[in-house]
Image: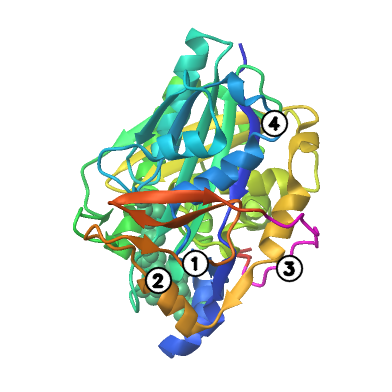
Amino acid sequence: MKFGIESINFYTPHYYLDLEALAQERGLDPQKYLRGLGQEKMAVPPPDEDVVTMGANAAYRALENIERSSIDTIMFATESSIDQSKAAAIYVHKLLGLPTTCKAFEIKQACCSSTTGLQIAQALVTQNPTQKILLVASDIARYGFNTAGEPSQGAGAIAIVLSAQPCLLAFNGESGSYTEDVMDFWRPNYRDEALVDGKYSIKIYLKALAESWKHYVKESGARFEDFYRFCYHLPFTRMAEKAHTHLAKINKSTLTPTEQYQQVADSLKFNPITGNCYTASLYEGILSLMIESKEDLSEKRVGLFSYGSGCMATFFSGTFLPHYKRWLQGEAHHHMFATRKSLIYREYENFYTHKLPSDGEDYVTAKHETGLFRIAGIKEHKRIYETCPIAPPQRPPLQQTKSITKWP
Ligand code: HMG
């Protein structure tokens, strides 16, 4: 039985801050962000967007050609949760009009809970191959003004329909895991912004990659040479360079730096213009690879690395399916990126510092540009979501990015 992606869509807010503007404000050389991190723009959600609206917007598009009544379970992976008790999945379930028989829950372990969701989905589908699972991963990465992490902030959501009838990517069964109690990145309940030991987090990420790869090789018998492409969790684009050269070195690869770069390059087209989307980042990279690769990747194998600080990591793999390109919404994604609005620094500050009231006061949220769903306000401590009309897409091409890492 096959298990994999039947449909996938990525959503990012309609606003971004150009990192050259941020560098100027911070008195830094913009090349530190553009080349040092490989980042060009960070997505910034307006006050009337949160993880629910972003997730619902991605899921709405992912379900365009899928009968909603066929969805048995919706899972929501996030580390930007809006409630300690109620799952964000239930809000999305309502906004999308999913059947009442559909189960809904939220999952957490930093950036890799989306991959745990995928593994739960695989178990459910194996048990009952008629099941279709909607996996939503949605996050807003927040480190705070003038911190080292600030230029790696971002926001976005991915929605994936997983089933036994995949048409884009089939996941191969085996995976390798690594878990260790470390304090590289965490966010206590009383904070809106993450605390991070940045340099340490990079070291732990690389250690978790090596260890989960070792476990994966033991479980699967696979070799580095068996993979045509690799996708990594992307906190910032140059992390993929550090990760892939590390993995190639561990495996004593004879590939040249240019060949190594080709193995990841197409997965790195979206992350530089959105920033870290935490749980959605690895899957944003997979979608980028599928949309941006000029080459037909059908039947080719891709190695996948999911990392969640704290930490837990998973190495797993997939194989692209024949005619997968037919099912991608490439033009719609290009349109979404190309029609976003650039914020000036002060607008970024205003969006970033906006908070919904936490004292129970009723509140009406100012209207900004959003997708189909937005938060209208708060009433009696409850978030009120609404559906708004959107203009049909004009579909201009993706703007050329300036920051793509070129490490050879
Ligand atoms: P920093 O203080 O900017 O680091 O923090 P830096 O001063 O070392 O500069 C970064 C790079 O820019 C360096 O390159 C510099 O040489 C270069 P490298 O040594 O790495 O090759 N550079 C320049 N390049 C060109 N021109 C210049 C210039 N100046 C400097 N003029 C850091 C960087 C990533 C640590 C920071 O942004 C941070 O803390 N980010 C947040 C944490 C993070 O992303 N960690 C990644 C691994 S953990 C993870 O992925 C999990 C996570 O997603 C959370 C979760 O799981 O939930 C974060």
Return the residue at label 4.
Answer: 168
User: Judging from the image, what secondary structure is the residue with disc 3 in?
Assistant: loop
Label 4 Cα crowd, 10 Å radius (few <14 / some 14-19 / many 20+): many
Count neighbours of disc 2 (C-alpha within 10 A) and say few if under 14, some if 14 to 19, many if 20 or more. some
Dot in front, 1 or 3: 1
In the rendered structure, which amino acid carries the disc numbered 2? Tyr
Residue corresponding to mark 3: 400
> Is residue 90 depicted above or below 140 in this figure?
above
**What secondary structure is marked by label 1?**
loop
Splitting the image into 4 quarters, where does residue 198 fall?
Answer: bottom left
The vertical placement of 55 against 25, above or below, is above
Q: Which residues are magenta?
A: 390-403
**Does the closest atom of ligand 1 sit within 8 Å of the Cβ of label 1?**
no
Foreground residue among 301 and 293: 293
The answer to whether one can see residue 231 in this image is no
Type of the residue with mark 3: Gln
Asked if the residues shown at circle 1 and circle 2 are in contact, with their CB atoms under 8 angstroms apart, the answer is yes
**Which mark is nearer the camera, 2 or 4?**
2
Q: Amino acid at mark 1?
A: Val
Q: Are marks 3 and 4 in contact (CB under 8 Å)?
A: no
Q: Which mark is residue 352?
A: 2
Point 48% across, 8% down: residue = 127
Magenta stretch prevailing secondary structure: loop
Residue occupied by mark 1 = 44
Does 400 lie within the magenta span?
yes
* Quadrant for the N terminus in the image: top right
Q: Position of residue 241 (x, y in %)?
A: 53, 57
- Callout 3 environment at 10 Å: few (<14), some (14 to 19), or many (20+)? few
